[in-house]
Image: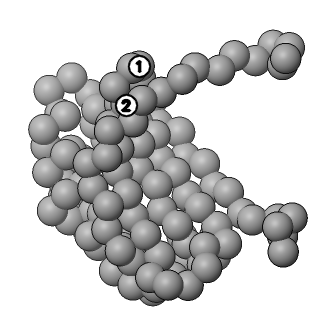
Amino acid sequence: RLMGASARWSRLKGVLDLPGASTGVQALAHYAVETDPESGWAEELSRWYADEHLPGLASVPGCIRARRFTNLDHPPESFACYDLTSLDILGTPAWLKVRQTEWSDRCRPHFTNTLRTRFEQSGIFE
């Protein structure tokens, strides 16, 4: 039992699951973005994720898999996760280029309650 912490179950519905440019390589890092769309922006953000953002990030060398889910039970509504060869991928010119498009600049201000989490494998299973 954790003191001062709470946990909630979430049922996630898969929306997109794309192989990455580095499919087949062992994932040593994971990056997750949880967010809610601002009122009236859910449809536009879903199009952006499906047509540009997720495919673009999946195509970056070092990205093994890119997935997006919707949370059926509670906020945050959107959950995107990326299996990576390294957390260093997040700072590469190729990754940043995908994040710096005109459509991204239009959509990103309409994210609310955003949480970005980075995970790195510790080697405990080696």
Residue 51: horizontal and vertical position, in percent? 15, 62
Determine whether the residue tagged by mark 2 lies in a helix, strand or loop. Answer: strand
Report whether residue 93 is seen. no
Q: Residue at x 37, y 57 (%)?
A: 67
Lateral position of residue 83 relative to residue 120, left or right: left
Mark 1 in CB contact with mark 2 (< 8 angstroms): yes
Quarter placement of the C terminus: bottom right
97, 15: nearer the viewer: 15
* Separation (CA) of disc 1 from disc 2: 6 Å
- Going by the numbered disc 2, the residue's amino acid type is Asn
Residue extending farthest to the top is: 4
**Residue occupying image coordinates x 26% and y 28%:** 38
Q: Secondary structure at mark 1?
A: loop
Callout 2 crowding tier (Cα within 10 Å): few <14, some 14–19, many ≥20: some
Look at the picture and state if 23 lies above or below 114.
below
Q: Is 62 displayed left or right of 17 in the figure?
A: right
For residue 74, the mark is 1
Measured from the top left, where is residue 88 in percent x and y?
63, 76
- In the rendered image, the quadrant that contains the N terminus is top right
Q: Position of residue 83 (x, y in %)?
A: 52, 67
Kindly identify which residue carries mark 2.
71
Could you tell me residue 10's position as x and y percent?
Answer: 47, 27
What residue type is disc 1 on? Answer: His
Query: Which residue shows up at 53% across the image and 39% down it?
Result: 115
Residue at horizontal 19 percent and vertical 34 percent from the top: 42
